[in-house]
Image (spheres, coloured by chain):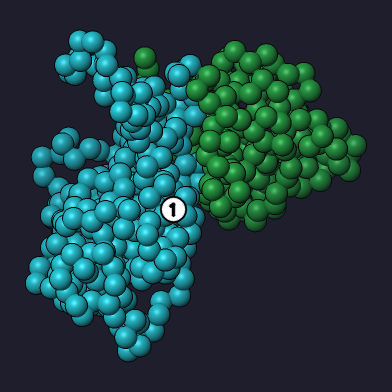
Amino acid sequence: MSTQAPVASASAEGAAPDATFEPVIIGFTCNWCSYRAADLAGTARTKYPPNVRLIRLMCSGRLDPTFVLKAFSEGADAVLVSGCHPGECHYIEQNYKALRRFHLLQRTIEALGIEPARLQLVWASAAEGVRLANEIARVTEEVRALGPLNWPAASIVDVDGMELDAVWEATGGDAGGLPATPGGANPKHGAEAIK
Amino acid sequence: MSPTAKSNGRATTAAKPKLAIFGAASCGGCDVAIINIHEHIVDVAAAFDIVLWPTVMDGKYSDIEAMDDGEITVTLVNGSMRTDETVHLSKLLRRKSKFMVAFGSCASEGCIPGLANLSSRKEILDTAFSTTSTDNPDGIRPIWEYQAPEGVLHLPEFEPMLRTLDQVVDVDYTIPGCPPESKQIWAALQAVVAALNGTGPLPPKGSILGAGESTVCDECARKRNVKKIDRFVRIQQVAQFDPEICLLEQGLPCNGPATRDGCGALCPAVGAPCIGCYGAAEGVVDYGARLMSAYASVVEAQKPDEIDKVLDGIVDPAGQFYRFSLAGSLLRSSKAAWNTDGEK
């Protein structure tokens, strides 16, 4: 019996991979580069999956680790952090802080049982619309393969009107494992969420 | 008049506000900290009719059940929500109390017992009942319900996850600390008494009592310079730290930057790093996130492999960043806690 948190996706725990699963990815982008890269991708009609919801920050260095943990606890399957290439930060060196927070966060979420691949870092300059689109597509497919995160934390509080036992049942409870169908614990999952 | 007052033969207690001190899943340290207000405990007994304090005096849950709703003025709950019994009694006391206080780290953010949320219930029970250090040849496990000839017996059932008090009931005030400093407890109790007597303001609901509004660093007497950390060390790896300079600057992971003040920075004063028992500083949503942010900002490395080399010095990130606050954190548990490996 391992005393460590098991790092395993839903599919690895016995549930069948679900073809209709559309991951929800929260993307934090920098005002000066990656957000403009996303803009450029749009202007150039470069397609990327609609699974990512981009949020603009003034700098990747603004990324408080709280944002990442809140995204996971409220139903995101993955978080994408994007900023200027090292050495090209609009605020000189704040993207190095983002890089270090990213490394520290990956270690911590792994210790809590979240696959490190659910947190990804992509550097993209304002000219790299195509590169950002390709990276979003790659991350989306990687997360799709991992399956839903279904983190129960957001709904575990009685105040939310949902008793712990209900969450316990919805996430597989004593039988172990996660629900085989999306929407078991988190109604935000599934194809409907993308429409 | 409460049954307790009757049994004590005190005729004048009817007008006194009622106080209950309830220990849920706790170590008893909070009760000791309350006793440590020394002779002031007599003042507490003079100001309140203590209707329940299982650690110190006799009291019956049935007496509480018989009370009217809101009859108890103040209830201090220490300890976390670990079994269905503690959840039930906390809900009962909430109903019977005007003011519910999460007293100490366990009740407010889960504390050390909350680290059990890193393991599944099966793993916890395996460790308690089936490891080589346990003398249990018959493999006996607790059962929550037992049919005895006289009737059905119940044991408090172990909840799948440990919760904080405010994840179970509405909480009016919080007194942080593991345990809260006795002088802070006395200050908080004085504030409550003053409010009840009408000689002081009633703190707004949700207030943190008996603590400051800044960080432990603010109370710490050590000298601080610009922080540039090129290695993290564990305390046993260094023979002697500089007694004057900030411990974090010397590479010792100190939780001061994220931790609420109020303790007097006792640990760093004697050369031990702050471990965060006073909980998150004012305005912090997630304790671990704030600490991660603080550490990452001052690490002196820019290349991914160099960064990893420095961060390797933090050997247990979950324990470092959530030693006291895992159950109260944004994620609240690990994946293991909600996967019991098929246990029934």
Colour seen for chain A: green
The residue closer to the viewer here, B48 or B202, is B48
Counting labels gives: 1
Q: Chain of mark 1?
A: B
Q: Is residue A97 left or right of residue B248?
A: right
Q: Residue B149: horizontal and vertical position, in percent?
A: 31, 23
> Is B221 situated above or below B199?
above
Q: What residue is pinned by disc 1?
A: B91
Rendered residue at 28%/68% (across/down): B2
> Is A6 situated above or below B42?
above
Rendered residue at 63%/15% (across/down): A15
Q: Quadrant of the C terminus of chain B?
A: top left
Q: Residue furthest top?
A: B137
Q: Residue B181: horizontal and vertical position, in percent?
A: 21, 62
Rendered residue at 19%/18% (across/down): B134
Q: Residue furthest bottom?
A: B199
